Image: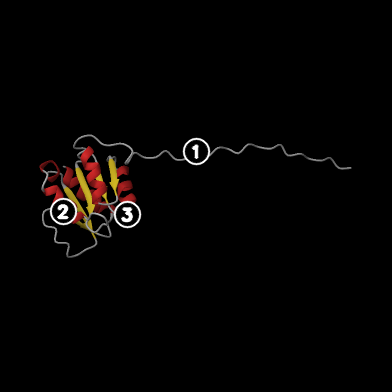
Amino acid sequence: MSPTHRRTPVAPTPVQPPKPRARTEELFGPSSGILVIEDSPDLREAMADVLLDEGYTVMTASDGRDALTILEACRPALLVMDLMMPTMSGFELLELMKCDPALASIPVLVVTASIDHGVRDHRVLQKPIMREALLREVREILE
């Protein structure tokens, strides 16, 4: 008779989820940080990740209405915003910002796929966005 081998059950190793990077969970203080406003989740996350990797404090919003909610609580140093979004477009948000002196003073970097965007008062970055172009514009605006 051959000996019977018994396997000792092994408890599974618990998998630790990655630590979330601060984004919308923490509001940034007055005149600090960057608010990224973009309806495409992939592009919004990609821009936020690029900025987070460079050490910026970043919050995100999916449209102008979400951005206004955030702007009621804090004043970022910069908005990086798309123009064509549902619920409230970037155009509508820019118009509302003009009416509020506290919001009108926040610099805006517009990111858009539109060639004929009509934006004259803000810097514009054409989509698709390259990492270095985004960082260059952000640095120049914040200096």
User: Could you tell whether 137 is left or right of 46 in the image?
Assistant: left
Q: Which of pointers 2 and 3 lies earlier in the amino acid sequence?
A: 3
First in sequence: mark 2 or mark 1?
1
| Crowd class of label 3 (few under 14; some 14 to 19; many from 20; radius 10 Å) | some
Q: Nearer the viewer, residue 104 or 66?
A: 66
- Which one is nearer the viewer's eye here, 93 or 17? 93
Q: Nearer the viewer, residue 38 or 95?
A: 95
Crowdedness of circle 2 by 10 Å Cα count: few (<14), some, many (20+)? Answer: some
Indicate the position of residue 5 as horizontal and vertical percent values: 78, 40
Using the rendered view, name the quadrant where residue 28 is placed: top left
Secondary structure, mark 3, is helix
Looking at the figure, which quarter contains the C terminus? top left
Spatial separation of the CA atoms under disc 2 and disc 3: 19 Å
Which residue is at a point 10% across and 47% down the rendered structure image? Answer: 99
Give the residue at mark 1: 16
Any part of residue 34 in sight = no
Q: Earlier in the sequence, mark 3 or mark 1?
A: 1
Q: Which residue is mark 3?
A: 43
Residue 123, numbered label: 2
> Label 2 is placed on what type of residue?
Arg
The amino acid type of the residue labelled 1 equals Gln
Q: Measuring 39% from the left and 40% from the top, which residue is drawn there?
A: 20
Q: Which amino acid lies under the numbered mark 3 shown in the image of this protein?
A: Leu
**Contact check, label 2 and label 3, Cβ < 8 Å:** no
Q: Residue lying at the far bottom in this picture: please name it.
A: 116
- State the image coordinates of residue 71 (x, y, percent, origin top left): 21, 42
- Neighbours of disc 1 within 10 Å: few (<14), some (14-19), many (20+): few
User: Residue drawn 23% across and 49% down?
Assistant: 80
